[in-house]
Image: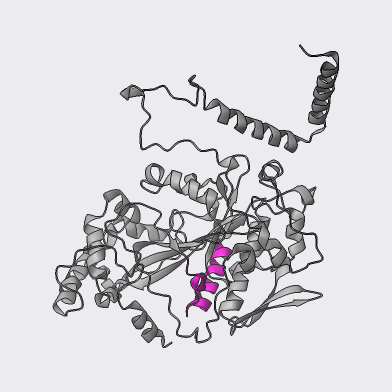
């Protein structure tokens, strides 16, 4: 039995504990609860009594969960790796407050709301992005901060020998066999994130005309995307200035703030006078989709974009959708890719951008084809061969990159459409054989999605004749077992051919 003295001490201790708990803030209470819950779950593992987390010793066969169904995941509590340690280097000001580690429970409890504009949020010092940066810290960095340090991805090397007048895109051939539907991701070659070519002037004009004629079908943004749009615009312009210093530069004045100088277009853009996506429209002929994390469920949603190269869809038709809703038409996506993609988006680090390519065959070079576009009629029939010369048929490659932005945590899906006349494959080792195999033996649902049927009656005879020709000429070995090339997404000897054609 407790003595009267010990009883008084115990009572006082209990009262103090209750008062301390009542004085705690909501995040502190949540943190305490989380710690107690984790301790309870650990100690309960030693007990033999079955619980909801302890399955019985055996399950009857009909009650076993399917082995191909992934376990449910709560993405609300999954965040990408943080890089707060880069903050002090990026802001280059030792007079500012030191950088402290932020408890993860505090970030979870005080995340910026999904539709909030970071510039007008209340309590910016205690409101955080999914990257654990407070809005005050982000404001302290200013414009055109050191994104290379913040992300861990270096700026590109200067490309001094580059000549826009003859520049060609690298010859991407993202053909794979044996083919099965996967993400097919590769590490991004950071020097080639945004690739200029001799069609720059033509593409800029074409994209501006598309926006003038189609408006929010090609460019639009929703609330909450402000920081992500700003980041990707500033990173793109920094890339241009570092990679192509002979054509692009940034300056800053007291009146205008930052000004982008475009030596190809011979004009300037005052950054503060224009929405970030319009800055990109005016200067960067590539597409950008901004995917934002929703703190309510941890999934990523398409919240802003400039997309002038989409086939069968548009910004307007997809804006606001979750990742899985965007990819719903893709064969096997739900069964084979949905879980992997959601998990990949949740955990993608800023320092690990990736690249991939998709392909199809097109008549002529359609850049933007929304639902109902007249060009879609070409896909509904096979034109007579006399109306469809081989010279009109092109391989279309959508060369894509995926990267996380370091401040907002948004994920940027970026791509550009590249067209190659099929006739060029005649002299590219193994490409005719590889493409023939895909067209003839590819999975029916995948090939139907790629919609190559409308040109196969013209393309296949040419490809088959080139397979034989390459073997007869010794360009490839006889009896080659068809498979993905080790040089993928290119072909053997591609670099010499590419450099020779453009002259540098």
Q: Give the range drawn in magenta.
A: 188-213
According to the image, what is the colour scheme of the structure?
one colour
Above or below — where is 287 with respect to 10? below
Side of 458 relative to 246 (left or right): left
Tell me where residue 477 appears, x and y as whole percent: 17, 73
How many badges with numbers are in the image? 0
Please state, as top left, top right, bottom left or bottom right, where the C terminus lies in the image: bottom left
Above or below — where is 300 with respect to 422? above
Dominant SS of magenta comes to helix
Tell me where residue 241 appears, x and y as whole percent: 61, 77
Point 52% across, 67% down: residue: 286
Magenta stretch holds residue 197: yes
Q: Is residue 234 visible?
A: yes
Tell me where residue 11 appears, x and y as whole percent: 82, 19
Side of 235 relative to 489 (left or right): right
Side of 326 relative to 253 (left or right): left
Please name whichever residue, 282 or 436, is drawn nearer the observer in this view of the structure: 436
Extreme-top residue of the structure: 1
Q: Is residue 384 visible?
A: no
Point 50% across, 84% down: residue: 162
Magenta stretch holds residue 315: no
Please state, as top left, top right, bottom left or bottom right, where the N terminus lies in the image: top right
Point 54% across, 48% down: residue: 346
Tell me where residue 60 appears, x and y as whole percent: 33, 21
């Amino acid at each position: 039995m407790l003595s009267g003295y010990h009883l008084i001490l115990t009572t006082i201790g209990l009262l103090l504990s209750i008062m301390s708990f009542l004085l705690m803030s909501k995040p502190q209470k949540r943190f305490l609860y989380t710690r107690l819950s984790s301790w309870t779950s650990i100690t309960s593992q030693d007990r033999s009594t079955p619980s909801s987390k302890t399955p019985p010793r055996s399950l009857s066969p009909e009650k076993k969960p399917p082995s191909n169904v992934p376990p449910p995941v709560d993405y609300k509590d999954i965040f990408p790796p943080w890089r707060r340690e880069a903050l002090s280097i990026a802001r280059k000001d030792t007079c500012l407050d030191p950088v402290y580690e932020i408890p993860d429970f505090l970030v979870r409890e005080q995340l910026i709301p999904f539709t909030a504009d970071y510039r007008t949020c209340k309590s910016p010092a205690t409101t955080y992005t999914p990257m654990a940066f407070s809005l005050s810290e982000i404001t302290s960095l200013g414009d055109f901060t050191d994104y290379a340090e913040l992300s861990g991805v270096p700026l590109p090397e200067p490309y001094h020998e580059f000549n826009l007048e003859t520049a060609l895109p690298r010859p991407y051939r993202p053909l794979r066999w044996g083919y099965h539907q996967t993400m097919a991701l590769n590490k991004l070659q950071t020097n080639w994130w945004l690739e200029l070519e001799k069609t720059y002037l033509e593409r800029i004009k074409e994209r501006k005309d598309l926006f003038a004629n189609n408006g929010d079908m090609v460019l639009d943004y929703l609330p909450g995307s402000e920081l992500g749009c700003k980041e990707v615009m500033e990173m793109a312009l920094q890339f241009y200035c570092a990679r192509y210093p002979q054509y692009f530069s940034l300056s800053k004045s007291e009146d205008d703030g930052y000004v982008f100088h475009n030596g190809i277009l011979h004009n300037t853009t005052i950054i503060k006078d224009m929405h970030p996506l319009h800055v990109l429209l005016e200067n960067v002929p590539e597409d950008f989709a901004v995917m934002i994390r929703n703190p309510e469920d941890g999934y990523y949603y398409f919240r802003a974009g400039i997309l002038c190269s989409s086939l069968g869809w548009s910004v307007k038709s997809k804006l606001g959708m979750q990742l899985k809703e965007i990819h719903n038409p893709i064969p096997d996506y739900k069964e084979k890719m949905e879980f992997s993609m959601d998990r990949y988006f949740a955990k993608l680090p800023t320092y690990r951008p990736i690249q991939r390519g998709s392909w199809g065959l097109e008549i002529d070079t359609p850049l933007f084809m929304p639902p109902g576009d007249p060009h879609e009629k070409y896909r509904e029939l096979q034109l007579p061969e006399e109306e469809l010369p081989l010279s009109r048929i092109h391989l279309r490659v959508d060369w894509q990159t995926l990267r996380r932005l370091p401040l907002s945590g948004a994920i940027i899906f970026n791509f550009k459409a590249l067209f190659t006349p099929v006739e060029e494959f005649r002299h590219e080792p193994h490409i005719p054989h590889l493409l023939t195999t895909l067209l003839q033996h590819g999975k029916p649902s995948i090939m139907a999605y790629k919609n190559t049927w409308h040109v196969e009656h013209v393309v296949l005879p040419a490809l088959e004749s080139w397979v034989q020709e390459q073997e007869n000429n010794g360009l490839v070995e006889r009896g080659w077992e068809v498979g993905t090339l080790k040089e993928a997404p290119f072909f053997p000897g591609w670099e010499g051919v590419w450099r020779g054609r453009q002259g540098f």
